[in-house]
Amino acid sequence: MSLNLREPLIFDFSRPGRGARGQWPAALAGPAVPEALRRRERALLPACSELDVVRHYTRLSRLNFSIDTHFYPLGSCTMKYNPRACNAAAMLPEFLGRHPLAPAAHGQGLLACLYELQEMLKTVTGMRAVALSPLAGAHGEFAGVAMIRAYHRARGDLERNEIIVPEAAHGTNPATASMCGCIAREVAVDAEGDVDLAALRAAVGPRTAGIMLTNPSTLGVFERRIEAVAQIVHEAGGLLYYDGANLNAILGKVRPGDMGFDVIHMNLHKTFSTPHGGGGPGAGAVGVSARLQPFLPLPIVGRDADGDQARYRWLEERDLPQSIGRMASFAGNAGVLLRAYVYMRMLGREGMQRVGEFATLNANYLSARLQQAGFEAAYPRRRASHEFILTLKRLAQTRGVTAMDVAKRLLDLGFHAPTTYFPLLISECLLIEPTETESKQTLDAFVDAMAQILREAAEDPERLHGAPYTLPVRRLDDVRAARDLDLAYRGPVA
Amino acid sequence: MPFIPHTDEDIREMLSAIGATSIESLFDEIPTALRTGSLQEIPAGMSEMEILQLMSARARADGRQLCFIGAGAYEHHIPAAVWAIVTRGEFYSAYTPYQAEASQGTLQTIYEFQSMMTSLTGMQVSNASLYDGATALAEAALMAVRANRRSKSARILLPRTVHPHYRAVARTTASNQGLRLEEVAYDRAQGGTPVEALRDFEGQDITALVIAQPNFFGVLEDVDTLTDWAHAHGALVIAVVNPTSLSLLKPPGNWGGRGADIVVGDGQPLGCPLSAGGPYFGFMTTRSEFVRQMPGRIVGRTVDLEGRPGFTLTLQAREQHIRRAKATSNICTNQGLLMMAGTIYLAMMGAEGLERVAAACMARTAELTERLAAGGAVRRMFAGPVFHEAVLALDRPAAPVLAALATRGIQGGLDLAEHYPELGSAVLVCATETKTTADIEAYGQALAEALPAVRAA
């Protein structure tokens, strides 16, 4: 293979006196920094030619798996195709060059997109109002729980500081509860993956601020008794939070607002296909029911009728005095929001209904085929939602082959691994989410790879412990990474 | 239908493998009463050509004005190569590098980013980025409470010279966890935070002092004196800095006798377009001893089974997916693509190029304030030295003057009336290396035309 599998650090290309001079502005004489405030030694930044830099980062890019290069069935992350048109539209020079504090009168086009995005998100989620400013899913979670707290406080209900989370919840749920000064209380789920209602009834009370639920849950199944859950929590005086991580499963099929949720965050980088970018940027818009509307985070795009002409503007504290406040330096990840807007307009109402349908079809097909190939589903009696869990418990016991071994071997076979070891309560699990944009041929090829791994596990389990073999690196020593911390380059070794 | 590849035959075969009669039947576990009808209020779908025509028309309507607003987001030249590389599918459409072996490109870039940021700020460790500058400050305040074990008060001194939005975000975040954020007054003549303003807090338990350099007014603070005061009184120092300025300004790690303890800021000036407020990236660096208190992803260099170097996420026991309710933060992602843009930008500019940029910004801002003051209706409000922004005092109301400038294609700065009413008619202006003498002259001309229409106060 001619691909470069090793790439030195950018610092290794650096030579004193070299530089991408075409990028530098002309030297200008101006005021000097006062002596006492001046930098004495130059920072250790590389001195490279433009070609050095372009070649280095282009080569690094080739060491990555990505949606554009590989099937990427990472459960709970919705790694669907990111249409290039979304990027092209968001990168139009007028949008890119717009200062966040520029006058609204000269940004009506952008604000119209954001306003319409708010409206479309309201419709698909069944919520009363939407704010776009949270910068990621977990940031949206923070806004949601902060609104729940603000709601109780505004009613003089000061004791409510417990947030209930099912034991299978994303780690961000309990972490968010803590960040909002609440106590996270976990409740069990039953053998079929539904919330244990008896445990829930025992957990709620006068201290219950709310419950955070993902539906379909992180177990890849729809919470069938959601109406009963809503009733129990509401009767106890708590509110319902919808973690939108799995919204892709139900888009166009059932709406969180209709299920009784009071607040929801949406991961626009999942359901609405903005890029994951190697870990961001995300966008975590929040939607609320009428009773939480006064507490929405700022700013929000408002629309004033001005004759026939609509005028858009940012709503601020004077418009929403009970708001939980500002979430970000400016108005949110506008560039991400524009990408989500373009995606939604391309899909339209019909395309959006197809998302949930084909995400579900693909997951159920893949689950059925993998079970036929000899793998064990964690919830074989349930319908898969947009994702499903395999448990490799038996394989681990009989052959000593773990979920990690299978994940690493999949990399050798040209597939990104599913999510491993989450949710925590299923041992040796793989959480698999194919998404609606993958074809049957791709899914069939993945089944073939999994079947091959199962054969290898029977014939030569040792080989699987050593995988991957064909990637830029073999398995990495994580223990050493955490023990002998090497977090930054310090200069050439003398 | 867009982006769904299934043929009718595929669908038939797939349903048959599942043993289902229809796609609809796959939703039979959802209570019927909850099922959504059609989404009639959503518009019909558009082709790529149609949506791009619509977006281009809206972008054209917004147009491009000559922008002299800074206030936390700065227009800089971005090398064409930066976003050409960032938007390569291998970076653009990858996710958090959980599978290290299949993500060495992203991981090595983060390691290089951490290296550059620690050196630029003069600190020992960096994370892989946070959401933006304001949220980075909020996280730094929470981190200071964890890190300063001698302090029990959770009191953070937050001077009024820190960006008002940053202070607002810190309040949103901190108010739920019982932190007390206390304002510190500024010097009306110099525009900085004088150490005298801290005297009232002496003898009290203070967790941390925030120091912005340059501050929101563009003014350079006496960072050495403020840092030493904080350390003498048992407080940690949280520095809020502009990364471009660090090529010329003393890095926070060298402030005062012991240096700052936590350094945060917004990385937007490093290769990230203004883009109406985001996405940008926040950065955070600190001392080695506080690394386990730091929020966010961190990448470390290690070796693989064959002893070859490689990169991996490390110290994950701080994070939400392991520690759940006891994590240092609920943060999950970083700002991957923006962090990458920042890294490529810094690699392209190098220390010398970044110095050039910073010096050009200082020179252009000085040129701008001199040109505008020449008319007589405008003067510099503060005497303190500035980096690439300055507050101008006007002899008549600012809002109508700025509105009149906007009709002439000039975004003339930020009206400070909302956040600093005590300053009277005051405008924060900024000129970076992107502004030419002709641009500055255009502003001067437009101002001369706009002023007569607005009656002097």
Image (cartoon, coloured by chain):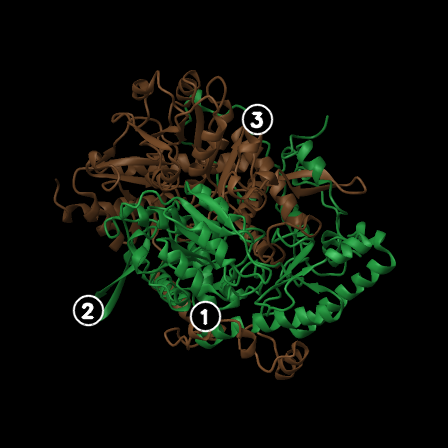
Q: Look at 24% across and 42% down and name the residue there.
A: B418
The chain painted green is A
> Disc 3 designates what residue?
B289
User: Closer to the camera, B230 or A186?
Assistant: A186
Q: Residues within 10 Å of mark 1 (few under 14, many from 20)?
A: many
- Which residue is tagged 1? A254
- Identify by letter the chain in brown: B
Q: In which quadrant of the rendered image does the C terminus of chain B lie?
A: top left
| Marks 3 & 1, CB-CB < 8 Å contact | no
Q: Position of residue A180 (x, y in %)?
A: 41, 43
Farthest residue, direction right: A459
Residue B455 image offset from top left, x and y in percent: 12, 44
Residue A384 appears left or right of B364: right
- Rendered image: mark on residue A307: 2
Decide: few, some or many residues near mark 3? Use Cα within 10 Å; few <14, some 14-19, many ≥20. few
Label 2 element class: loop
* Foreground residue among B316 and B99: B316
Label 1 amino acid? Answer: Val
**Residue nearer the viewer, B135 or A409:** A409
**Of labels 2 and 3, the one closer to you:** 3
What is the chain letter for disc 1?
A
Q: CA distance from mark 3 to mark 1?
A: 49 Å
Q: Looking at the picture, which amino acid does disc 2 mark?
A: Gly
